Amino acid sequence: MTHPDAVQEADVRQTPAETTPSRAIAPLPVAVGITVFRPTPAQVAALCARVEADPRLTIVFDNGGLPPEAATGLKQRGARVLSEGRNIGVGGALDALARAATAAGAAQVLLLDQDAEFPPGQVAALEAALARLSASSPPPALVGPRPEAAPGRKAPSAPRRPEIPDDGSLVPVEFLATSGSLIDLAAYARIGPFRSDFFIDGVDLEWCFRAWARGYGCWMETQTALPHRVGAGVIRSRLLGIEMPRQPPFRMAAYLRNSIYAWRLPHVPRRWCLRQAAYLPLQALLYWADAGFRPGILAGLAGGVLDGLRGRLGRPRGLPS
């Protein structure tokens, strides 16, 4: 069991080993941080092409499965490659990227997944948006693109933050997916690291709620978009009025666990907790029905709920090796 007060100490201890790049790269105001996990050859090729096309410093965190020849190719193109030799989860990888970007002298870091189609030109739009918000109150913690659904997928949520007015095309949001988000590193230092003990789901949600609670804002630039490929398809119920990504059982259990645990955190708004209390049982029922009402699936979901109530976080049960 991970005690909530131990989260930041655990994150500080996770210092990834950095491989030496083949050529020196001058630090730039914005660094690009990309998390990879078992990337396909096509994803590796796209990543190499991106590194070549973008003059910004690119830092890649290998959360497992990056072939050695792919890492070599990225370094030859100027990227820095980090790894701890194992899967440390989304939160741990994001923190490693933020720390490395800070150490390189960057003022912001753009966080991306391995399959994110977000060309360098769109990054400039976020840089301009963050600059526009720099004098706002509250100051910005991040700005990201409008989430869109890739074909056959569901777009992540980005609910509007109440009582905060828009700033032109910029909309204040409760939270935003980390992939595509441009993080202000000075704000990150004050807000604190992502929760590594959440491991995979709800990491972005919790950090953004914490940012708002600590006097920072999270914003969506509606004039630029990023397609997301969450899960392996979509589960829908017209009767319940719900659609959700189709995820492996361990990830659905982790989603339930982290959502329920988050209810005890003082910076998570009560309105969100009440919404989730009504929504999560319907999602669990829909997921179980889609899985054919198998008893083992129900037991896994119930285990996730129990872990959330008990505060048992960390690596999810059933996580593939």
Image (cartoon, helix red, strand yellow):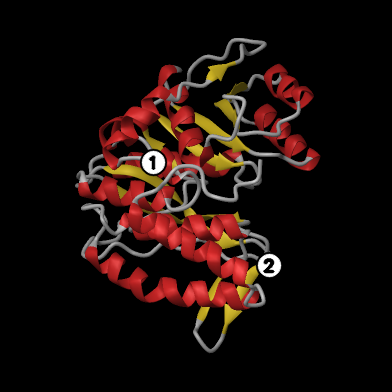
Q: Label 2: state its secondary structure.
A: loop
Write the residue at 45% across / 63% down.
157
Query: Mark 2 to mark 1: distance in Å?
Result: 30 Å
- Report which quarter residue 19 is drawn in: top right
Q: Position of residue 6 (x, y in %)?
A: 30, 34
- Front-most of residues 195 and 147: 195
Q: In the displayed structure, would residue 262 be above or below residue 240?
A: above
- Front-most of residues 113 and 86: 86
Q: Around disc 2, counting alpha carbons within 10 Å, would you say few (fewer than 14), some (14 to 19), or many (20 or more)?
A: few
Residue 195: image tag: 1
Write the residue at 68% across / 19% down.
75
Marks 2 and 1 close (CB-CB < 8 Å): no
Quick one: quadrant of the C terminus?
Answer: top right
Q: Position of residue 228 (x, y in %)?
A: 59, 56
Image-based side of 193 in relation to 95, left or right: left
* Amino acid type at mark 1: Arg
Residue 152: image tag: 2
Write the residue at 60% across / 34% down.
63
Q: Label 1: state its secondary structure.
A: loop
Can you see residue 165?
Answer: yes
- Report which quarter residue 296 is drawn in: bottom right
* Amino acid type at mark 2: Gly
